[in-house]
Image (cartoon, rainbow, N blue to C red):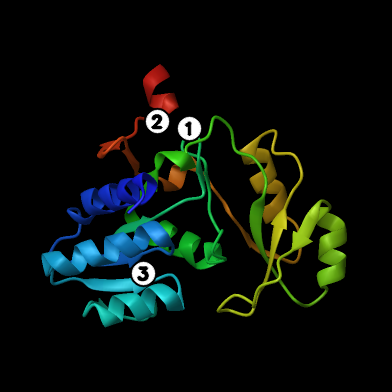
């Protein structure tokens, strides 16, 4: 196991302690979450899980976790997921695995949304690419409005959306998020605001620690 993989495992194992008997838990997608699933299964917690992707669902089910559809469920006790970028104010970029629409729905439904990463995902400032899920209907028109956007050569999302990446400037994540959200044809973007994030656990130098948000440090 590489040092980076070990740091992912440490962050995942540290977050798994938050999953307790009787909870409704949202599970994200990606390589760090794969370590989380193993850690949860090893603890034999009696909880119910909602997954953000078919891949996570298949792994979780194979490990014996009680996975349910995200139907008839209005809130979750906790959701745990990885990220592609985390800045000091807890802006995130997610969607490298093309699951960001479902991931954002799960994060918004959770009382606590905890992000698990290794130190390579920490950035001084958010930068492109920003993952997008787009409607197939009117796609050329949507791309023209967005500008600086490239389609990915990947299958559609589980919900039929086209996956792309915005590659323009990210001078202000909040302004860009608002612009992307207001563009007709954009189903969802991969910018996750700090208001969604309850905490970040980072694996670094052989240990897992909770990060402190920059705004909290200055305030």
**In the visual, does 163 lie left or right of 46?**
right
Q: Alpha-carbon distance for marks 3 and 2?
A: 28 Å
Q: Alpha-carbon distance for marks 1 and 2?
A: 5 Å
Kindly give the residue lying farthest to the top in the view shown.
218
Residue displayed at 40% across by 45% down: 197
- CB contact under 8 Å: marks 1 and 2: yes
Q: Which residue is mark 3?
A: 74
First in sequence, mark 3 or 2: give its number: 3
Q: Count of labels shown? A: 3
**In the visual, does 3 lie left or right of 184?**
left
**Res 213 label:** 2
Residue displayed at 30% across by 49% down: 6
Where residue 29 appears, as percent x and y from the top left, is: 43, 64
Instruction: Determine the image quadrant of residue 55.
Output: bottom left
First in sequence, mark 1 or 2: give its number: 1
Instruction: Determine the image quadrant of residue 34.
Output: bottom left
Instruction: Determine the image quadrant of residue 127.
Output: top right
């Amino acid at each position: 196991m590489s040092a980076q993989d070990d740091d992912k495992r440490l962050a995942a194992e540290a977050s798994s302690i938050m999953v307790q008997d009787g909870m409704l838990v949202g599970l994200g997608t990606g390589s760090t979450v794969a370590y989380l699933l193993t850690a949860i299964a090893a603890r034999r917690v009696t909880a119910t899980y909602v997954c953000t992707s078919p891949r996570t669902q298949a792994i979780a089910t194979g490990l014996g976790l009680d996975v349910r559809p995200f139907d008839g469920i209005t809130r979750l006790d906790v959701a745990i997921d990885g990220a592609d970028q985390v800045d000091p104010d807890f802006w995130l970029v997610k969607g490298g695995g093309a699951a960001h629409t479902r991931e954002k729905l799960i994060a918004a439904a959770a009382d606590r949304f905890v992000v698990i990463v290794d130190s390579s995902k920490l950035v001084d400032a958010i930068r492109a690419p920003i993952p997008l899920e787009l409607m197939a209907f009117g796609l050329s028109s949507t791309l023209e409005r967005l500008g600086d956007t490239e389609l990915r050569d990947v299958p559609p999302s589980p919900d039929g959306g086209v996956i792309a990446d915005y590659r323009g400037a990210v001078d202000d994540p909040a302004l860009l998020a608002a612009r992307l959200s207001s563009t007709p044809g954009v189903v969802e973007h991969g910018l996750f605001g700090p208001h969604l994030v309850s905490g970040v656990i980072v694996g670094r130098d052989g240990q897992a620690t909770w990060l402190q948000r920059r705004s909290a440090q200055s305030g």
